[in-house]
Image: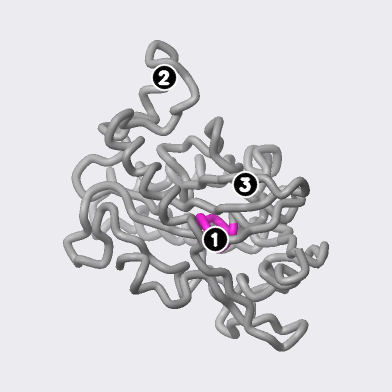
């Protein structure tokens, strides 16, 4: 989807004030295209370091084999002096790397992630390896699968309880309280580009003026994601929290 086709690329309903808040593109798509050109030239995420110091895990050849890819976002902001500040973010995790210099950090801190999430992920991966090594009809396989399911289900509420969202009225809200859909929180809420960028701007006193998100990597067989195309913030995970996160933006 090209920029001209994006009527509303970042919006959501705020249950506090009863209004729908939105953020347009501004010049963000121009900054995003510059980022794509950088991707084609450098082909890695750690653009702030020289080639000799580059992390091989952040090479696009390693990150995007086959159909793998990620969403990337650019947020154009103004600081208190009226100067333009351009933030960039990637969605979710890149090969287990959560923070990369030059990119906004995840909402969930590394401290909380290492204390709470990482041990659970390690145990889930251990169980997965054990399950895959067993015959499909094995009772032990069924037992381990149930154990893995319980760990995963127990971990998600703990993770969600550690996400604190900030809006542009200076308010902070737990993720589960800001999420307005009635059917519960899906996994990965708060890890997409839009929320990460808005959180960083709100925490650091920056005023967003435009947002653009695009996909980079291998094209999906389904055709839902094509490299270099722009897409709006997702309906399932982002829109239910964007109303709260954008609230107060008109006064910044």
Q: Which tag is nearer the camera, tag 3 or tag 1?
A: 3
Q: Label 1 crowding class (10 Å Cα cut-off): few <14, some 14-19, many 20+?
A: some
User: Residue most toward the top?
Assistant: 52
| Secondary structure category for the residue under label 3 | strand
The CA span between labels 2 and 3 is: 28 Å
Query: Which portion, as a residue range, is magenta?
Result: 188-195
Q: Is residue 78 above or below residue 105?
A: below
Which numbered marker is on residue 210? 1
Left or right position of 106 against 235: right
For marks 3 and 1 on the same chain, the one whose residue lies earlier in the sequence = 3
Which residue is at the front of the view, 34 or 113? 34
Q: Which tag is nearer the camera, tag 2 or tag 3?
A: 3
For marks 2 and 1 on the same chain, the one whose residue lies earlier in the sequence = 2
* Residue lying at 45% horizontally and 61% vertically, measured from the top left: 146
User: Residue most toward the front?
Assistant: 82
Queried whether the magenta region covers residue 128, the answer comes back as: no
Q: Which residue is mark 2?
A: 54
* Residue lying at 48% horizontally and 61% vertically, measured from the top left: 149
Q: Which residue is mark 3?
A: 84
């Amino acid at each position: 989807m090209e920029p001209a086709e994006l009527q509303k690329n970042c919006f959501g309903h705020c249950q506090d004030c009863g209004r729908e808040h939105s953020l347009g593109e501004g010049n963000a798509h121009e900054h995003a295209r510059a980022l794509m050109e950088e991707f084609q030239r450098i082909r890695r995420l750690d653009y702030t370091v020289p080639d000799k110091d580059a992390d091989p895990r952040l090479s696009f050849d390693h990150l995007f084999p086959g159909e793998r890819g990620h969403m990337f976002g650019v947020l154009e902001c103004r600081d208190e002096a009226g100067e333009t500040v351009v933030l960039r973010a990637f969605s979710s995790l890149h090969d287990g790397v959560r923070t990369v210099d030059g990119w906004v950090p995840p909402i969930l801190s590394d401290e909380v992630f290492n204390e709470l999430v990482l041990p659970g992920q390690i145990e889930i991966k251990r169980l997965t390896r054990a399950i895959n090594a067993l015959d499909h009809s094995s009772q032990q396989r069924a037992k381990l699968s149930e154990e893995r399911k319980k760990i995963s289900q127990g971990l998600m509420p703990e993770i969600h309880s550690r996400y604190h969202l900030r809006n542009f009225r200076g308010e902070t809200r737990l993720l589960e309280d800001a999420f307005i859909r009635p059917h519960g929180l899906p996994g990965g809420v708060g890890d997409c580009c839009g929320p990460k960028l808005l959180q960083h701007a709100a925490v650091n006193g920056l005023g967003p003026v435009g947002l653009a998100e695009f996909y980079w990597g291998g094209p999906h067989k389904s055709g839902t994601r094509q490299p270099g195309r722009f897409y709006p913030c997702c309906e399932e995970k982002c829109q239910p929290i964007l109303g709260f996160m954008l609230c107060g933006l008109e006064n910044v």
